[in-house]
Amino acid sequence: ASPIARLQIALGILEHHASPEDEKRVKRALDEVGNLSDLVNELLSFTRAEVSGRQMELEKTWIREVVNTAAAREGKGDGEFTIQIPDDLTALAVPELLVRALSNVLRNAVRYAGTAGPIEIASRVEGDRVLLDVKDSGPGVPEEELGNLFKPFFRAEASRSRDTGGVGLGLAIVETCVQACRGTVTARNRDKGGFVVTLVLKKG
C-alpha cells in the first residue's frame, strides 16, 4: 500500500477507538489526507498527459465515441448529459488524451452544476475545425477569473469553492491534453446563465 493509503488506514483505526472529541479531529485529518490523495492523483495525471502528448501521433478520432466514453465514465446514469454529436463526425486527436480532457470537463460540470439541469455536449463544424461545447446551467465563474481557469492549482473562489471538491488541476489537465492534440480550449460564461467549455480540434 502507498504511504497515503497506510495513513488513511491508521486514521480509520484511530477514529474507531477515539473519544467523541478526538473523533472530530481525526475526521478532519482524514479529510485532509483525502484531499492530499486527490492532489497526488491529479498531479500524476497532469504529468502523464504532458509526457504522453509528446510521444503520440494524431489519428482520425470518432468524436461521438469519445463523448460516449467520457459521459459513461463521469455520469451516474441519471440523465446528466444530453449529447448532440453526429455519429460520423471525426477530428484529429490522441483518443485517450481527448477522453481524459473531456472527462475532466464533464467532471467539473457535474460537480458545480449537476443539480441545475442536464449538461449539454454538442458539436459544431467551422471550416476545417471541429468545436466541441460542454454547456451547463450552473453559477458560472466570475468574469475576472476566467483568464486563470486553466492555470495549475487555480480555483475560482466565488461559486466554485474548495467545499465542492477537487484541487484545481482539472482544467489544467484539460488544456495539456487538448494542446497535445494540437487543439485549443476556452471557457466563458453563457449569456443567460451557466458556463461553457469549448474544445477546438482540426477536422479529421
Image (cartoon, grey):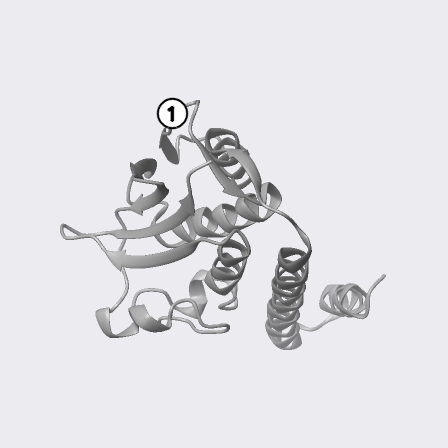
On the question of residue 157 being in view, the answer is no
Location of the N terminus (image quadrant): bottom right
Place residue 54 in its image quadrant: bottom right
Along the line of sight, which residue is nearer the eye, 199 or 19? Answer: 199
Position of residue 161 relative to residue 92, above or below, is below
Q: Mark 1 points at which residue?
A: 86
Question: Mark 1 is on which residue type?
Answer: Pro
Residue that appears at 52% across and 68% down:
167
Q: Mark 1 falls on what kind of element?
A: loop
Name of the residue lying farthest toward the right: 1
Residue at (50% x, 60% y) in the render: 170
Horizontal relation, residue 105 to residue 11: left or right: left
Image coordinates of residue 142 in percent, x first then y, are 25, 69
Q: How packed is label 1: few (under 14 Cα within 10 Å), some, or many (20 or more)? A: few
Please identify the quarter of the rendering in which residue 7 is found: bottom right
Residue lying at the far front of the rendered structure: 128
- Percent position (x, y) of residue 16? 74, 63
User: In the figure, 36 relative to 181: above or below?
Assistant: below
Q: Residue at x 42, y 67 (%)?
A: 150
**Nearest the eye: 191 or 140:** 191
Residue 188 horizontal/vertical position (percent): 26, 58
Depicted 68 relative to depicted 1: above or below: above
Closest to the observer, 134 or 55: 55
Spot occupied by residue 183 in the image (x, y as percentages of width and height): 45, 53
Number of disc labels: 1
Q: In this view, does 69 lie to the left or right of 122?
A: right
Residue 43 is left or right of residue 181, and the answer is: right
